[in-house]
Image (cartoon, rainbow, N blue to C red):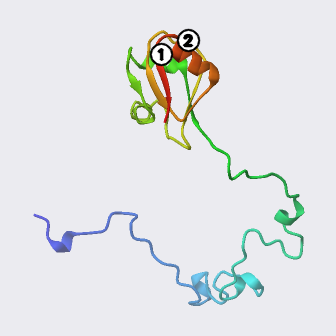
């Protein structure tokens, strides 16, 4: 039977803390391992990684470039060949179903159907956008392409 006196911490879980400034023989006496003088030896002598002394910092030496279009729409793209192999005839394909079956990983700003590959089964496809050719191919075989 184990009693409370027998309990010990898991080996390696308890670390002895560093006793700083407790005499020369401790190895961390006097300056407590911080060396002599200077910013890093002071109380809150933290120096940020981007600080470069008097030198012009890297982020100011590099030129500004680029443009972030805040109105850009990003679509999850699905090709007809994927719909052909993953769905049966007369199935209803919606963005939710595509997410459920793992065909797309997330919706972004919507789903766009592209025309790569051939389709032989009539499907009801509901998406946010269709390429012109994809829409034609779906409707040619008797399916419906609905913009949701």
Of callouts 1 and 2, the N-terminal one: 1
Note whether 135 is above or below 60 in the view shown. above
Looking at the rendered structure, the secondary structure element under dot 2 is loop
Return the x and y of residue 107 as percentages of the image width and height.
Answer: 51, 41
Return the x and y of residue 53 as percentages of the image width and height.
Answer: 85, 75
Looking at the rendered structure, the secondary structure element under dot 1 is helix
Return the x and y of residue 57 as percentages of the image width and height.
Answer: 85, 68
Tally of numbered tags: 2
Identify which residue is drawn at 70% across, 88% down.
42
| Residue receiving disc 2 | 118
| Mark 2: few/some/many CA within 10 Å (<14, 14-19, 20+) | some
Report how far apart the C-alphas of labels 1 and 2 lie in the structure.
8 Å
| Mark 1: few/some/many CA within 10 Å (<14, 14-19, 20+) | some
Most foreground residue, 138 or 83: 138
Identify which residue is drawn at 48% across, 9% down.
120
Q: Say whether residue 28 is left or right of residue 145.
A: right
Identify which residue is drawn at 85% across, 58% down.
64
Return the x and y of residue 10 as percentages of the image width and height.
Answer: 33, 63
Identify which residue is drawn at 47% across, 15% down.
84
Quadrant assignment, res 1? bottom left
Q: Say whether residue 93 is left or right of residue 28.
A: left
Most foreground residue, 50 or 110: 110
Most foreground residue, 18 or 81: 81
| Residue receiving disc 1 | 84
Quadrant assignment, res 123? top left
Note whether 63 is above or below 80 in the view shown. below
Q: Contact, CB < 8 Å: mark 1 with mark 2?
A: yes
């Amino acid at each position: 039977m184990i009693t409370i006196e027998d309990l010990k911490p898991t080996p390696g879980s308890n670390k002895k803390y560093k006793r700083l400034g407790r005499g020369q023989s401790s190895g961390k006496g006097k300056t407590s391992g911080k060396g002599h003088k200077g910013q890093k030896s002071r109380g809150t002598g933290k120096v940020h990684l981007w600080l470069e002394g008097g030198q012009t910092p890297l982020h100011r030496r590099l030129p500004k470039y680029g443009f972030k279009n805040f109105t850009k729409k990003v679509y999850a793209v699905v090709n007809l060949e994927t719909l052909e192999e993953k769905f049966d005839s007369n199935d209803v394909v919606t963005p939710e179903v595509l997410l459920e079956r793992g065909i797309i990983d997330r919706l972004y700003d919507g789903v766009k159907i592209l025309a790569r590959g051939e389709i032989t089964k009539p499907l009801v496809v509901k998406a946010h956008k269709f390429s012109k050719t994809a829409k034609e191919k779906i409707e040619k075989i008797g399916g419906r392409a609905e913009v949701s």
